[in-house]
Image (cartoon, rainbow, N blue to C red):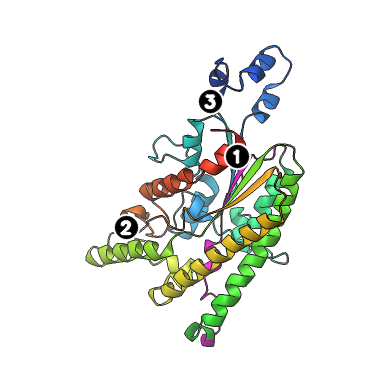
Amino acid sequence: MRRVWVIPENFLERISQPSSRFHPDYLAYKRGEVTQAELIARLPHVAMIGDSVCTGTHVSTPWKTFWRARSCRGRDWFLNVDSAAEIESVSKRLEKLTPLVASHHAGIGAMVDDENDRPWFSRRILGTQNLSGQINQLLTANRFPDLILISIGHNNVDWAWRSPAGELAQPKIRLQRMSQSFRKMFERRLRKLIGHAREKRDRISIVVFGIVNFETYFKGREEAERRREQDSTLYPHLETTYKYLISFRPDYRENVIRLAKMANQELREMVAALNRESASDSNVQLRYSDALATADLSRAELLHAVDGWHASAKGHNVLAEAAFTDLAPSLEFLGIV
């Protein structure tokens, strides 16, 4: 998916008010001292790195899924530009505090990747960038973000994919190996992002969200499955999920929950270790957030009515509320509140 940039239509009106902290910039713009592009660059910039959990998508037939992935953007918990979609996204909530520029880089199937990994053909035709590619988009952008939200790794917990039969039956060692590899790959990518951020003069906050709460999520999924048993017209692509994530099958779910918890612990320890390396006066704030990892997703109504897999509008609101509530330390660090 191509990155999506959104700027509030009324930002000029808002910063023209004398009470706005951007009012001096507005006056400079009116005097012709700065261009509109330069004026926009002075607004806070917020970026989202992630996978399909961060997008307003669902799966159905291959062609429709492809079309949706390429064309349907801006209807999710981070960014909602569709007034018909009843989602109070994080960016909309932030806009109440300040005019800002939001950029969305997440894509379907995105993963935390190794240096030697090459995106699969299916992801290339969708335009999906893995974690490394999304970070590179930020590094090469004309304006580096002030606030970076990272929510990725859900495809990395598909532990049963390509698993040898012996490890399917006895997965303990496999799960440990996968969680440790996940941390190493994530840390290498994150160090590159942090290093670039430290070269900037302004304050920058990076928030690493833990993987969503699969323990409650699968309760919602089980409720959707029971509803489908009673009415076969519901969730018409419920089983299509298994073509993409083998580990979502009932027999494998327990270890998805285990691996996600292990991965989140690795993320928490990784962030703590990186912060111990940082100088006390660093311009970069790095935080781990368990907001999504503790959000209650146990109701079927939070899942999409077509695939019972991705989030519904109500589900996106739950994620938006959880994520936004935990942004207070970042906003304080950036001087937005």
Identify the secondary structure beneath mark 2: helix
Q: Is residue 45 visible?
A: no
Identify the secondary structure beneath mark 1: helix
Residue picked out by circle 1? 333
First-in-chain label (2 vs 3): 3
Residue drawn at the location 74% of the way across and 44% of the way down: 140
Number of residues whose C-alpha sits closer than 10 Å to that of mark 2, classed few (under 14), some (14–19) or many (20 or more)? many
Q: Of discs 2 and 1, which sits in the foreground?
A: 1
Residue drawn at the location 32% of the way across and 66% of the way down: 222
The boundaries of the magenta stretch are 142-166
Q: Position of residue 101 (x, y in %)?
A: 59, 34
Q: Of discs 1 and 3, which sits in the foreground?
A: 1
Residue drawn at the location 72% of the way across and 49% of the way down: 279
**Residue closest to the eye, 35 or 208:** 208
Identify the secondary structure beneath mark 3: loop
Examine the image and state in which quarter residue 162 appears: bottom right
The residue positioned farthest toward the top in the image shown: 31
Residue picked out by circle 3? 9
User: Is 333 rendered above or below residue 296?
Assistant: above
Residue picked out by circle 2? 300
Q: Position of residue 115 (x, y in %)?
A: 72, 64
User: Is 207 rendered above or below residue 117?
Assistant: above
Amino acid bearing label 1:
Phe
